């Protein structure tokens, strides 16, 4: 057990735990933030995507020791009030079906828009193909990313 | 109790869905009227679906399971339409398992079509009571009042009372037994693409799925399972597992050995440290090759007839041209993004379950099987499901949780990891098919004979869609044989239509080619007695510009199929390169599903069903070796990605017929449309799924 301190959604946390604990389970179980999801546990699907110092990472593959002293942002911290352009676009475009992949998709897309203000379809393919959706909402995800890019 | 008698003023039927009591109905006897009258009713609750309070908020109970098919919005739309509700005042509540709701199983694309009338009446009942309450309040003729968007209006004087203002009076009225329903031409809500009511919770992370559910003091468990179907743990060494900080207990259950811990990470680490000795049982050398051989052998014996028009054998024997083909499709896993999970608490002679399920009654039955408790001691709470596709009908994950919970005095959530979910599924069965077709000298089909050989011994998973061949062929024989293969099988979105539409629509395409005819025209000629099949076929062909010039290298294929009372046709547009690489450019789907509740919801289901079907056709296969499923995660059970996603266009046939299925119908015609397009592109027929691009290499 180690003491690991980091910031999550703007709040400082200091936790005593196994430093090898995957960040996903610290977020979901220790901190009770269940917006970030488990689906594969092997960095294959993207449902566990959060931001580490603003960059998308796969929390299922990240030991909590790696975030010591750094800033983690989860879907709950993306905006206070559904005001992020991607959240608005997701709602306007009626993207989500079951919604389970939605937080990871949005966090990954947010990372893309932070780097590329007007991503092309190829940019979207290159980034978003790493986030799986079994309900088949890809066409709408693409539209939502373009829509949010107009606003940003 | 389902009394539907008309009762006098002063007494009233009040249907209560007080959570946890299982009480469907409570009579308020005259003795209690004084108590009831002492506090004026603050809501109108004429039935289990609608409750309106003095603020005008309309609480509608959604009694099925939300899996992404958007019943959360569509079913309340039906109630709200007849109620003449102000949609902005509607709030949806999840209905837990309760006989008062009737059937709560969510599947068969049946939620809208089997509850449409019931939900319309539920909303209309409340509307009529509100109109009566207003007429009484104003002391006017009831016929001069109308309900409109959350208020009742007295037309001659333009007076208006909102529903909130009327609930106290309305709640004192008898509940009418017969109520008029709106003319569909007056619909304001049904038929509109209203936004999903739960979308916000999905984009801000607040939506709670089964996997997320928590209770105070809850423990978390994962189960180590034998990798071979039918195997059992003979012994285990849990000393290392129990040494993992946070692990509380290790216990054997029917399906394996459970590690129970304070949280998920501890449970996973504990399971990793657990050493189990397995008796792999009788299936330890089962392989996909064995299963395939068994199905082929079984197909050599006559099957149970599903259809026997004329004399197919004689027609085939006398045909000018005869074709034969065999088709084979593999086991498929559902692989929803959320793996299976269930939270259970067993204490004081009761059992309470919280789970993502498509079958709360089945979940309850599973708990009863484990505990032996009576029905009214077992409560089931339905949670939002991260993808169902039919997997949620099973109760294996419920039984696991109840077994673990039985030994604890706190609630426990049993979750699965992805490998478990893939390797311990209830698969779409593998099937082998033999088909023969005969043409006369003018290229018209005269005979069709189809034998299905399935790895499932559940006829409900084997035959759907096969005998419903719509084409005007005078001699048709369809039969099936089943083998009892020890691999669990279950309902996979569109069920037996997946294999039977593949066969029907690929083979009719082969007959068209043998007849030297365009596949669309060939089908058209044979569907003259089936206007709704023709309707979708024509619409899809028109919108896909069938027969028109396509961009260089692009080719089209099509398919049409009837399932779950709806008609769907798909045109696939592909190109295939010399290495056999397939690029799917566009999928055009025409669907006739009768009256549409929410058009955008239909489009979502078409897009989703097509994506699932393309994934299956390109990548989907669960294979076995040494009794073990060889796939374990998304690297070897691949899903379609954004990059591979074609454009999907949906065209809905306008209809005033009653609503019919939407979730499943787009799936069956998709793989044959794709495979037929590949034939158009390459001249090669694919008769095995998933597609082997090696078969498409040129040179």
Image (cartoon, coloured by chain):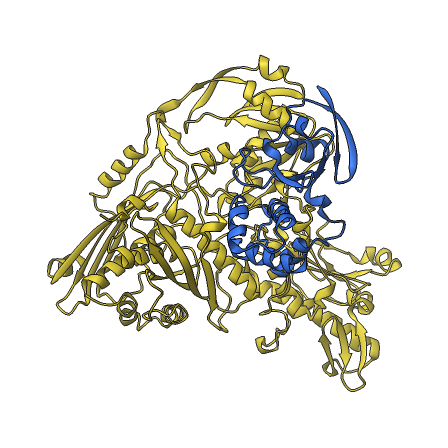
Chain colours: A blue, B yellow
Residue B177 visible in the displayed image: no
In front of the other: B633 or B286: B633
Residue B478: give x, y in percent of width and height. 26, 54
Please say if B351 is above or below B598.
above
Which residue is drawn at the image coordinates 20% and 43% (left, top)?
Answer: B300
Please say if B162 is above or below B159.
above
Q: Residue furthest right?
A: B38
Residue A53: give x, y in percent of width and height. 69, 38
Determine the image quadrant of residue B288. top left
Residue B53: give x, y in percent of width and height. 79, 61
Which residue is drawn at the image coordinates 77% and 56% (left, top)?
Answer: B28
In front of the other: B294 or A90: A90
Which residue is drawn at the image coordinates 63% and 54% (left, top)?
Answer: A117
Please say if B471 is above or below A74.
below
State left or right for residue B637 relative to residue B91: left
Q: Residue furthest bottom?
A: B156
């Amino acid at each position: 057990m180690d003491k690991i301190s980091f910031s999550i959604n703007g709040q400082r946390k200091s936790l005593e735990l196994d430093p090898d604990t995957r960040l996903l389970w610290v977020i979901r179980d220790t901190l009770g933030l269940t917006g970030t999801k488990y689906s594969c546990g092997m960095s294959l699907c993207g449902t566990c995507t959060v931001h580490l110092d603003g960059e998308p990472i796969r929390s299922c593959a990240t030991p909590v020791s790696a975030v010591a002293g750094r800033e983690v942002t989860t879907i709950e911290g993306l905006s206070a009030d559904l005001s992020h352009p991607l959240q608005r676009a997701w709602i306007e475009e009626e993207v989500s079906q079951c919604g389970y992949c939605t937080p990871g998709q949005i966090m990954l897309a947010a990372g893309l828009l932070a780097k590329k203000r007007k991503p092309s379809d190829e940019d979207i393919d290159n980034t978003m193909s790493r986030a799986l959706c079994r309900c088949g909402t890809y066409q709408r995800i693409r539209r939502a990313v373009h829509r949010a890019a107009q606003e940003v | 109790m389902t009394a539907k008698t008309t009762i006098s003023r002063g007494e009233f039927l009040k249907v209560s869905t007080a959570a946890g009591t299982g009480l469907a109905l409570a009579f308020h006897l005259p003795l209690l009227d004084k108590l009831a009258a002492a506090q004026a009713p603050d809501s109108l609750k004429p039935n289990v679906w609608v409750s309106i309070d003095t603020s005008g908020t309309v609480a509608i109970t959604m009694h099925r399971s939300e899996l992404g098919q958007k019943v959360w919005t569509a079913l309340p739309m039906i109630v709200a339409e007849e109620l003449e509700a102000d949609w902005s005042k509607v709030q949806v509540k999840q209905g837990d398992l309760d006989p008062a709701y009737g059937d709560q199983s969510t599947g068969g694309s049946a939620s809208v079509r089997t509850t449409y009338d019931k939900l319309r009446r539920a909303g209309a009942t409340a509307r009529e009571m509100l109109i009566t309450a207003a007429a009484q309040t104003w002391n006017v003729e009831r016929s001069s009042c109308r309900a409109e968007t959350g208020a009742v209006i007295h037309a001659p004087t333009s007076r208006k009372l909102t529903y909130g203002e009327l609930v106290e009076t309305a709640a004192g009225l008898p509940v009418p037994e017969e109520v008029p329903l709106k003319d569909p031409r007056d619909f304001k809500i049904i038929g509109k693409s209203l936004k999903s009511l739960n979308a916000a919770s999905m984009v801000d992370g607040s939506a709670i799925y089964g996997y997320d559910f928590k209770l105070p003091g809850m423990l978390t468990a994962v189960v180590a399972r034998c990798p071979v179907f039918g195997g059992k743990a003979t012994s285990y060494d849990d000393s290392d597992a129990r040494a993992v900080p946070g692990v509380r207990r290790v216990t054997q259950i029917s399906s394996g050995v459970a590690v129970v811990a304070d949280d998920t990470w501890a449970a996973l680490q504990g399971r990793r440290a657990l050493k189990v000795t397995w008796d792999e049982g009788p299936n330890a050398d089962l392989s996909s090759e064995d299963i395939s051989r068994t199905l082929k052998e079984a197909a050599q014996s006559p099957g149970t007839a599903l259809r026997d028009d004329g004399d197919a054998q004689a027609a085939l024997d006398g045909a000018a041209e005869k074709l034969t083909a065999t088709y084979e499709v593999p086991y498929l896993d559902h692989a929803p993004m959320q793996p299976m999970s269930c939270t259970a608490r067993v204490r004081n002679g009761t059992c309470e379950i919280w789970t993502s399920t498509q079958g709360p009654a089945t979940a309850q039955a599973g708990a009863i099987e484990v505990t032996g408790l009576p029905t009214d001691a077992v409560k089931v709470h339905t949670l939002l499901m991260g993808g169902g596709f039919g997997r949620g009908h099973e109760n294996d994950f419920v039984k696991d949780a109840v077994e673990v919970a039985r030994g604890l005095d706190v609630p426990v959530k049993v979750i699965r990891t992805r490998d478990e979910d893939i390797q311990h599924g209830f698969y779409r069965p593998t099937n082998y098919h033999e088909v023969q077709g005969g043409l006369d000298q003018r290229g018209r089909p005269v005979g069709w004979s189809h034998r299905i050989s399935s790895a499932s011994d559940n006829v409900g998973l084997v035959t759907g869609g096969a005998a419903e061949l719509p084409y005007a062929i005078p001699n048709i024989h369809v039969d099936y044989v089943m083998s009892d293969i020890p691999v669990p099988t279950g309902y996979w979105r569109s069920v037996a239509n997946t294999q039977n539409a593949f066969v029907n629509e690929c083979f009719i395409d082969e007959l068209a080619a043998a007849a030297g005819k365009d596949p669309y025209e060939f089908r058209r000629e044979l569907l003259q007695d089936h206007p709704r099949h023709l309707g979708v076929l024509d619409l899809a062909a028109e919108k896909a510009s069938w027969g028109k010039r396509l961009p260089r290298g692009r080719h089209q294929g099509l398919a049409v199929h009837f399932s779950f009372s709806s008609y769907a046709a798909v045109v696939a547009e592909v190109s295939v390169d010399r290495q056999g690489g397939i690029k799917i450019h566009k999928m055009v789907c025409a669907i006739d599903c009768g009256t549409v509740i929410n058009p955008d919801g239909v489009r979502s289901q078409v897009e989703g069903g097509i994506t699932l079907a393309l994934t299956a056709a390109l990548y989907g296969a669960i294979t076995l070796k040494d009794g073990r499923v060889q796939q374990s995660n998304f690297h070897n059970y691949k899903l379609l990605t954004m990059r591979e996603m074609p454009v999907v266009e949906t065209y809905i046939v306008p209809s005033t017929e009653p609503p019919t299925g939407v979730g499943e119908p787009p799936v069956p015609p998709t793989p044959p449309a794709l495979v037929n397009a590949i034939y158009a592109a390459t001249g090669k027929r694919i008769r095995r799924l998933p597609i082997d691009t090696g078969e498409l290499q040129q040179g």
